[in-house]
Image (spheres, coloured by chain):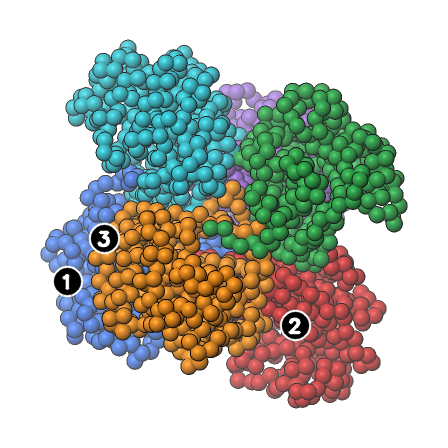
Chain colours: A orange, B cyan, C green, D purple, E blue, F red
Amino acid sequence: MMRLSPPGYSKFSQATSFDIVYGGGSANVSISCSYLGMKAAHVTRFPDNALGKAATQFLRQHWLSTKHVLYGGKMLGKYFLEKGAVHRPSEVIYEREGSAFSLIEPSMIDWEYVLKDADWFHWTGITPAVSEGTAMCCLEAIKTANRMGVMVSGDINSRKNMWNYGKTMQEVMPELVQKCDIVISSRRGIREMFGLGDLECNFRDSAEALMKTFPRIRKVVGKTRKSLSASHQQIQGKMWNGEEYIKTEMLNITHVIDRVGTGDAFAAGLIYGLMHYEEDIQALSFASAACALKHTVPGDVNMVSLENVISLMEGDTSGKIKR
Amino acid sequence: MMRLSPPGYSKFSQATSFDIVYGGGSANVSISCSYLGMKAAHVTRFPDNALGKAATQFLRQHWLSTKHVLYGGKMLGKYFLEKGAVHRPSEVIYEREGSAFSLIEPSMIDWEYVLKDADWFHWTGITPAVSEGTAMCCLEAIKTANRMGVMVSGDINSRKNMWNYGKTMQEVMPELVQKCDIVISSRRGIREMFGLGDLECNFRDSAEALMKTFPRIRKVVGKTRKSLSASHQQIQGKMWNGEEYIKTEMLNITHVIDRVGTGDAFAAGLIYGLMHYEEDIQALSFASAACALKHTVPGDVNMVSLENVISLMEGDTSGKIKR
Amino acid sequence: MMRLSPPGYSKFSQATSFDIVYGGGSANVSISCSYLGMKAAHVTRFPDNALGKAATQFLRQHWLSTKHVLYGGKMLGKYFLEKGAVHRPSEVIYEREGSAFSLIEPSMIDWEYVLKDADWFHWTGITPAVSEGTAMCCLEAIKTANRMGVMVSGDINSRKNMWNYGKTMQEVMPELVQKCDIVISSRRGIREMFGLGDLECNFRDSAEALMKTFPRIRKVVGKTRKSLSASHQQIQGKMWNGEEYIKTEMLNITHVIDRVGTGDAFAAGLIYGLMHYEEDIQALSFASAACALKHTVPGDVNMVSLENVISLMEGDTSGKIKR
Amino acid sequence: MMRLSPPGYSKFSQATSFDIVYGGGSANVSISCSYLGMKAAHVTRFPDNALGKAATQFLRQHWLSTKHVLYGGKMLGKYFLEKGAVHRPSEVIYEREGSAFSLIEPSMIDWEYVLKDADWFHWTGITPAVSEGTAMCCLEAIKTANRMGVMVSGDINSRKNMWNYGKTMQEVMPELVQKCDIVISSRRGIREMFGLGDLECNFRDSAEALMKTFPRIRKVVGKTRKSLSASHQQIQGKMWNGEEYIKTEMLNITHVIDRVGTGDAFAAGLIYGLMHYEEDIQALSFASAACALKHTVPGDVNMVSLENVISLMEGDTSGKIKR
Amino acid sequence: MMRLSPPGYSKFSQATSFDIVYGGGSANVSISCSYLGMKAAHVTRFPDNALGKAATQFLRQHWLSTKHVLYGGKMLGKYFLEKGAVHRPSEVIYEREGSAFSLIEPSMIDWEYVLKDADWFHWTGITPAVSEGTAMCCLEAIKTANRMGVMVSGDINSRKNMWNYGKTMQEVMPELVQKCDIVISSRRGIREMFGLGDLECNFRDSAEALMKTFPRIRKVVGKTRKSLSASHQQIQGKMWNGEEYIKTEMLNITHVIDRVGTGDAFAAGLIYGLMHYEEDIQALSFASAACALKHTVPGDVNMVSLENVISLMEGDTSGKIKR
Amino acid sequence: MMRLSPPGYSKFSQATSFDIVYGGGSANVSISCSYLGMKAAHVTRFPDNALGKAATQFLRQHWLSTKHVLYGGKMLGKYFLEKGAVHRPSEVIYEREGSAFSLIEPSMIDWEYVLKDADWFHWTGITPAVSEGTAMCCLEAIKTANRMGVMVSGDINSRKNMWNYGKTMQEVMPELVQKCDIVISSRRGIREMFGLGDLECNFRDSAEALMKTFPRIRKVVGKTRKSLSASHQQIQGKMWNGEEYIKTEMLNITHVIDRVGTGDAFAAGLIYGLMHYEEDIQALSFASAACALKHTVPGDVNMVSLENVISLMEGDTSGKIKR
């Protein structure tokens, strides 16, 4: 998607230009992975025009392989972001309807080819919400990954008001989630999508219920976000891995630069962490640190280096100049 | 429509921001009229969100009455403009499909209320091309104007590839055009829409044929544009008023700043001219001067003053500093 | 007034461009009211040149009626703002002398016409400080409003060093204030202008004294501002309505974006609140929330939505993204 | 003066920021001289605030000595420039009234101290037009220069509508001009100020008449400007030195970047030329080349190098890249 | 190399920011090839820091393969560009000394691996001028290409003042050039490097002499550039292919946007042309059109599309908007 | 040095432009002194090209005398700064090698001439680290200052990894430091350079040891910086003057705008303080306040006014608007 935002803290009513970046859930995750040093590709569909090319070029610039990008359709999905501060919330206007991506059809992607030599496949809950086609593509991908022995993680959070094509998330998500190895979700997500747990139920119990329902899942991961204000957030990772309930230290982001994409940074950090650390607590700490750092990077995408994440994960919150 | 363009002469592939203005055929005409000192309103439909409001605010800023703007639908029509130079053409990508305007329906507008106290109604050939709804609205408006004795002018030029909703321009345009008092069109437009004239036929003969076919039309107006390059254009107005064939001096725009909206500036100039001058040649000269000056104003809209237009119309091409 | 400020936190000595907005006490109040959904007009005088027009266009863009703007004189009032941070104060340089507004004369405005159909007239203490003419205009307006039964509110704070035309605020203000229904003032203002209360006197007692002196006044409203630094402010509304002394919760603006115009946002919020809520505490809470939110909006003017204010007024300080 | 201009070719009605430079006739001349390698100082008066300091810093940045700048008064003189193109004229709005400079008084400047070690004193016709005080200062300076044997040049062009303080240019200018060694003027200037020559009279004859009237004058210098459009200008220098009438080749500036300050660049070039070349034709060619090059430099001031001017003066119009 | 240039037409002395692009002779050629639809890689060496990565990312963004980029050394080569206009020349300041690229050593690149599956190898005369190491690398590459049957083209123009490492171009170039299939050079280049032809000798004769001396060369290609001014250039391609002397129409670039990299665009166009057209005149026309179009694209690199080039090559100089 | 930084909080990988300022340790100190009202000059060496001139112009703009700037060499020293936030550190890339300054040689500067009429000479620990030449120049300067009775202060902090020219700081620094009157250093600096004190040793004892070793030193000054994050710093000044150990209040910079150059602002504040206050505690408080304020000014240089510093030094941390 193309993200268009008024410069600085200007409101839409003041803007005479929009800053442009390209992003969107899964693109953000894969670019984050690239900046951490992993090889990653993004599978999507862009219109076959100069804007679709510019979006592709953005992905390439940020280290992704774009050989699996499809072209067709007429419109690039968009969202407009007005950045808030303190008590003033950021506002987002989506324009996804009719986008090239929303018109994707299952047969369009050769997932065996895409996943050849891949270690990991990640999807987000936005994809199946966009259209029947994207949901089916996502399912195909997950099935192929399962068949080929590729790890599958899903960041399944989804907003009810996104589902406008005739199916509900309750109908679509279970089939996708049951084939996942790792699931990122909030307590609320588990409750709303699968009817597991009630309002009092804590994360651990929700996660446990989810893993019982879908036994393939090996870890359920979440994060606690305290929104003290639009400018001050706190982040803590949590995980149920079937054996223990793990929580990281609360990280305190006192001066938010850009809050968008922080969940994707968390997912990317988790993938990196699970692939590179032996202990779940390390993976989770890595993910939380990556998430916290994204709050300081303008745009959708976490461009911090591996060194930055490790340093914060190891407790250095000083932000001292590196010369 | 929202117009998004990379700054300066940057290409889409280089842009990290887009300059934003709002415009589109008939909006451009009415704003131009306002800058010339006439009271004008624009009738359209915007989404009921912050972007729709920002578009409205743009119209207000540029002196329009927006009391007839409707709100509804989800998307604001857009176009992306990459500005060319010399031999490199400007490129335009439209995103009109599904826009709030395209989903307008005839009953939505109370044209009697809109046209109360109006002297003039102007429409462009883009409107009926967008959707069945916009075409029907346009027809309603014209009929009401006829009934109320309001002058009607139409800038009927239209590109075939715009008509995607199932009707052709040959089917739709005649009913609209026959109710017009003033028609702006090219020779090619007259030939393609109404089958009048052939490739050899000159403007005068085409115009004459059109006026015979649709006897309400009192003047057919056009312009000759010589595109020496994207940076150098020449403009000449021409008119058949049923009695004489009138042509203005060729105006030489040697350093184009923004070529978009120049046709709309011509239309606005023509409306002003016909309302304020006795002689057709004066009206046409005024229109041509307005058109030429628009080439020097960034954005879609002609913001030059009445004094600027009169000065050029009277032959002062020197561009000398006014202190 | 035109406000010119170096971009970001640059100092005057670094600036190669100035960001331009238009504002000034009462313009800010009326625009704020417009964004909250009320119909508002601004009465002022601008030079009859392109800058005066641009100022008018700014007011129109931000929803105001400008039909009562007068044109004449040569100069647009200006102020230059260098934005501070933390311990570094913002610096303001005024250039009001000789402005079109300062040269206004009483007979120029037909207040009966202006106030026809109006529910409320608001003035600020800056207006009578500018010149004898503006003071007389202000008095005329207030008298007319009284006569026509239009509510009058005055934000009477005024800095002694602004009064340079030969009269002191002690001479001018009493006649204006005694005709007000609602007065916004600080304790210091009441003491300095009317000699009511001493240094130890609290807000409630000052307000009570003021209302005894000028019995038309129904409410005296103020706010406590704690300036922890240029980047961190706290705001609390307070009101004496003749019966109770009301105070709102202290709002904590931890990351100030633009501190200018926050008093005007408070006034606009108060007007909205008094017109739409039954309880004074609600009106005051609304005003305080509006004031707090203005600190996060660049420019002089509070462009937040009614929803934003209500949400904060109801206690949601989280600033969570609205999608 | 502070110059404020909308970026690029934007109109005042579109501008959300102004580019800032500092300039004004005689400042431009002295900075130009500095870039050509001469030591120069500028004598003026700025307000004693951050804007006055910023103006001083601008002069220092561009190599001037500012030790003779006075501080006092409240306002910095300003002008607003909207840059035109092709047939659209640039528009300038002056705000000089009440400026620190306009309030200068003769006794404020110790001209003996200023002119110690100076070889040349230059003044422009704007200075005596601003106020009685500036006119008297100018006269004092010229008298002192005469007494100290410092060369005096005056660029005496002046617009009638600038003279608003009660005296006409016909009353003031003769006393100033008669003490000059070098005069830059147009034919029209000579006719209007001194009643010399009529409409048919050519430059040479006007100049001759002027030199007869004021025998101290040794050279009268002018330039022919052909304004083909705001974007295309032609420049030719001309001089009557009492013996011959000299004209340079016409220089063709096909793509104007910034037309303001070109007359000042001419004056600076003339001063440099007369001090460094033996032949008048060389000095005049140098001045014309400097003038032509200024049209390509954004801002008021000619920042081209000595090498640039010499190269164009010697006929290299190719603009080839220097690596 | 990193290119740093003041925005617009600002001079170095005015700049408070620099626009950044990455480029340099051979990078420009390969990116141009990519935009024309060919697969291309760039071989170079960047410092192993964030700037080296940013340079790599720029290449990726513009479609290049960067798998052959080496990392090491400390400094990224740079050049500063001040853009001229009309008679004012652009000025370039190089900072190549000590760059990561200049410290490259022959053994660092495995040319067999690089050239596997390649059809074409292109080098420019700048490379052997930078250092002994780059010259040796270049020679290695050419030898390997010869051995592997890969076509070799060299744009051998070189400025004498670039050769500072102890060898002259007369010593180094012959060995490189004799192994080329296609040579791009000026008459002057042939004369200075190889002592072939004299000042009167025309291009055709120089080219013929060169091909006699180095029989492997199959075509010698050049262009005539007329620099009417920095803002107006004319371009004509010319070629001696051993049998005929071919010249294209002169293309007239009346409004130059960015003149840098136009030679590289020519080279890229030539490579494309020779690979895709049967007739040399077609290839040369394609190259000339590509070169002309580059003058309208900001930055070092020709980002125009294949369609743009073909359209101009086929004679459409109108620059008409593409909708 | 030229400082190049991506706008706002952008990362190098996102930047399409760099903001440019000029600075570097001792330049920052002298400019700071100028803004506090002292006359200051900076002695350095710039390349004799447009960039060297632009650097000079920057110094002049910020009030320095540049008459002792030398020209020669080819490259201007540079550093690239990516500004961090919260947990994300700022990153600095230096490019000093081969700079004009690094190639300075002792005989190049006539220190007697430079120091004539000077009251104070200040140097920083970076200078002797750059090259043998800069170290020798520095020594010469200090010796001359000693001989001429000019006070000498040195901010001797230095990073080990800066010393690349063959000498260690342990070899070079003692000779320089022993001739200083005032030394600014951290505890670590004293330990590493002179082997005085161990890890447990506190500032006071280290300072005492240093003064025993080098009896000329009269005061050793340092500051405690607490880096709560890149966006939140705390600063406290400390001094051992041979008699008492003095510490200031901790200043709390809650919203850092630009952390670079804050040490230099401290040094400048110290120089001002020692020259204008009788009590060391006042001088130290002044230095700390200056240092704290620099954190709020973009760029390398402290541009706050004397009034700002005094106000904070006297305890006003409110940052209230100055009108």
Task: Give left or right: position of A155 versus F221.
Answer: left
What's the residue type where badge 3 is placed?
Ala
* Label 2 close to label 1 by CB (< 8 Å): no
What is the secondary structure assignment of the residue under circle 3?
helix
What is the secondary structure assignment of the residue under circle 2?
strand
Q: Residue C210: image x %, image y %?
A: 84, 37
Chain on which label 2 sits: F
Q: Nearer the viewer, mark 2 or mark 1?
A: 2
Q: Residue F268: image x %, image y %?
A: 70, 67
Chain on which label 3 sits: E
* Label 2 close to label 3 by CB (< 8 Å): no
Which residue matches tag 1?
E218
Which residue matches tag 3?
E287
Mark 2 residue crowding within 10 angstroms, few (<14) / some (14–19) / many (20+): some
Location of the C terminus of chain E by quadrant is: top left
Task: Give left or right: position of F120 versus E192.
Answer: right
Task: Tell me what residue is drawn at x 26 percent, y 40 percent.
Answer: E317
**Mark closer to the chain start, 1 or 3:** 1
Location of the N terminus of chain E by quadrant is: bottom left
Task: Tell me what residue is drawn at x 72 percent, y 81 percent.
Answer: F203
